[in-house]
Image (cartoon, helix red, strand yellow):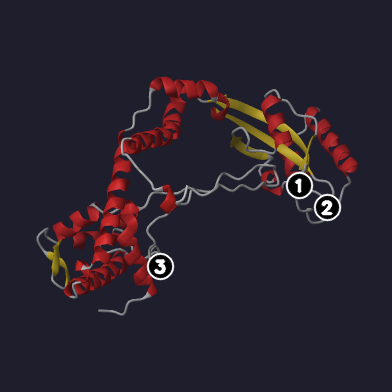
Amino acid sequence: MKALTISNVLILAALATAYGQTPASSPASSSQTPAGQTQPPAPAGGIVPRLAPGMLAPSAPPAAQAVAAIPPDAVVLVIGDKKYTRAQFEQFVAELPDQLRAAVNGPQKRKFIEQYADLEALAQEARNRKLDQTTKVHTLVALQTDQVLANQLYQDLAANVKVDDAAVKAYYDAHKNEFEEAKARHILIRFKGSGVPLRPGQQELSEEQALAKAKEIRAKIVAGGDFAALAKADSDDTGSGANGGELGTFGHGRMVKEFDDAVWTLPVGTVSEPVKTQFGFHIIQVESRTSKTFEQAKPQIEARLKPELTKKAVDDVKSHTQVTINDEYFGK
């Protein structure tokens, strides 16, 4: 057997605890772009099985045809006194948590199975030494079993929770603005102190100079000037400027407050007066505003409501189990 490494320890820990983990969200972070737009929330991070370094690195997978040619009763893995046929191994994989199943079926399949072999070899030796008969191991196994069962119950409750149509409709009626989107474009004229970098070759403008320039550009647009061409030439938001000022579509609250207020009150097609934010003066044109119908928003709302309903179902289960805690021993 190969020497046990840190990488091996990580996968052993993952295999030992994966079934008992439930995702834990991390606070979403946001930052503002020069256009005043906030970045989308960072993906929720949770406790997931830790794969060894390099497990997700690209690598050529086994030829599909060669794998398909292996009969179900052929032995594909032997670890000490344990043997797996292809059918047995694939059944074993099918019952793994999603993250581990993805790893064992991924491009680093070989590395994963080598680390699993290390796990099994150590476990067999532990049994030979009768470590599985100690009270310490019995306690750990019992605790892990409880974690697996509790997690499985949570998944079962989540899969079977039903969202009432009336609750979905009530949520939609109370949060209609969450399902609205605007498409807009802008031209930004920065002034001294703005968080937007000064473009190469451009002169630093005072707030008064920037406002005068923004008004001059707006007058050109109102007189028939090409908004996109002026954005490419004059916008200090170089990202959107290169695209004619286009910001794409976005919902409420995605922009800094002054910009957001203008977008949701400005008549569609109208060119705004200069709008001041911490980035400078914006000339804004709302190209369209749309809103999802109830039927379009329904799947999204159901996905939002299910976690809360699942929590209620879990709390209901817990409420039926009597728990008595000695305050003198554990504290209040």
Residue 54 disc label: 3
Amino acid bearing label 1 = Asp
- Residue 296: quarter of image: top left
Q: Residue at x 61, y 26 (%)?
A: 289
Q: Residue at x 51, y 25 (%)?
A: 292
Q: Earlier in the sequence, mark 3 or mark 1?
A: 3
| For residue 57, side relative to residue 84 (left or right) | right
Q: Quadrant of the N terminus?
A: bottom left
| For residue 16, side relative to residue 298 (left or right) | left
Q: Is residue 297 above or below residue 122?
A: above
Q: Which residue is mark 1?
A: 236
- Residue 285: quarter of image: top right
Residue 259, position in %: x, y? 71, 35
Q: Are marks 1 and 2 in contact (CB under 8 Å)?
A: yes
Q: Residue at x 20, y 56 (%)?
A: 92
Amino acid bearing label 3 = Gly
Q: Is residue 158 above or below residue 34?
A: above
